[in-house]
Amino acid sequence: MSRKPFLSIIVPVYNTEEYLPCCIDSILAQEFTDYELILVDDGSTDGSPALCDRYAASHEQIRCIHQANGGHTSARQAGTRASAGSYIAFVDSDDWISPHMYDRMSKAARETGADIVHCNMTAVMPHKEELRDAPFAPGFYDKAALEQQIYPQMIYEGTYFKFGIAPGLVNKIFRRGILEQYLFRIPYNIIVGEDGPVTYGCMLAASSVYFIDESYYYYRSNPDSLCHHMDSGRLAENHTMFETYGRIIDTVSHPAILRQLHYFYTYQSLLTFVPVFRAMLSQQGNFREAFLTECSHPCVREAFAAVPIREITGMHNRLYAFCIRHRLYGLFRMLLTH
């Protein structure tokens, strides 16, 4: 490893003792060797901190940071501050990667000068695996090609709801200067969806991007985990996320992105409105006031006014969207109970 590595790989770690060896071993098995690995123990309470220390003690390219629990974004920011690489990569501590991943991606970055290199990834579920690929031809895209071919479908590919480019950071490597413009602008209290503003901000700022048509990243997908944390605080998280997109993404220079964000906001709202308000039905509180307040949030109101209801998938979702657009509290409540 050179004194200043080409690539810094940052792994936030929080209570993933069961999966962490698989993750770290897959990084150590890389064909590419010009990297440093920074493990950020984010206040774990299981055996993860000791595992991180053992790996760091036995591998010179590994460093370990221990910090009080601050969340995924806090850990990524801490790792980035401590890193020295020209490019930055992230791996989640319960996932793993192909041994070819960073050799192929770093070679593309070095040969083309691309600010971002993107590969496909595979969702690993208990009984099957699913390829998650981008709907763009592989190869090098300069700024003109990004403007013409990528940005118009970057967030919303046109099928409700399918991303053009997945919002996750983990299947990409970023030139340091591009990443630092956006990573440090993300608030710590976004628990779900914190990757998107960084990824899309970097894509818009990039002079060039290289797409690789192979899957090198494997992530553990648990559909049940999508249902966690569905209380009123989840709606507040949505607000923070939407407002962060609005602060980071320049929709004036890229007006097509605003339309895509409207589709994303309706999708994200429908994911959370129904379980949150269904849970509210069994609790004390002013359901009507909470529903009307949520419908009046500027991002929610504008998105549901902009997106044609006929383009939303599923009859129930269309009915929910109609209620949200027109603030029909009674009908929305009735739909939740049927």
Image: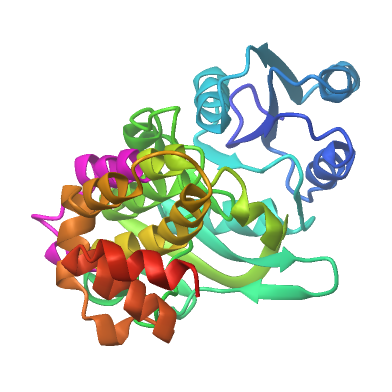
- Is 276 left or right of 53, judged from the image as shown? left
Q: Eyeballing the image, is 300 above or below 328?
A: above
Q: Eyeballing the image, is 290 above or below 190?
A: below
- Which quarter of the picture shows residue 62? top right
- Total of numbered circles in the picture? 0
Q: Residue 234: x percent and y percent?
A: 45, 43
Part of the protein shown in magenta:
238-259
The residue positioned 35% from the left and 53% from the top of the image is 200
Which residue is more in the foreground, 75 or 44?
44
Residue furthest to the left in view is 252
- Is 287 left or right of 327, judged from the image as shown? right
Q: Is residue 256 magenta?
A: yes
Mostly what secondary structure, the magenta segment?
helix
Q: Residue 5: x percent and y percent?
A: 61, 31
Residue 247 visible somewhere in the drawing: yes
Q: Residue 117: x percent and y percent?
A: 49, 57
- Is 280 left or right of 44, judged from the image as shown? left
Q: Eyeballing the image, is 203 above or below 248?
A: below
The residue positioned 35% from the left and 72% from the top of the image is 320
The residue positioned 74% from the left and 40% from the top of the image is 33
Q: Quadrant of the N terminus?
A: top right
Q: Eyeballing the image, is 320 above or below 218?
A: below
- Which quarter of the picture shows residue 330? bottom left
Q: Residue 267: x percent and y percent?
A: 38, 66
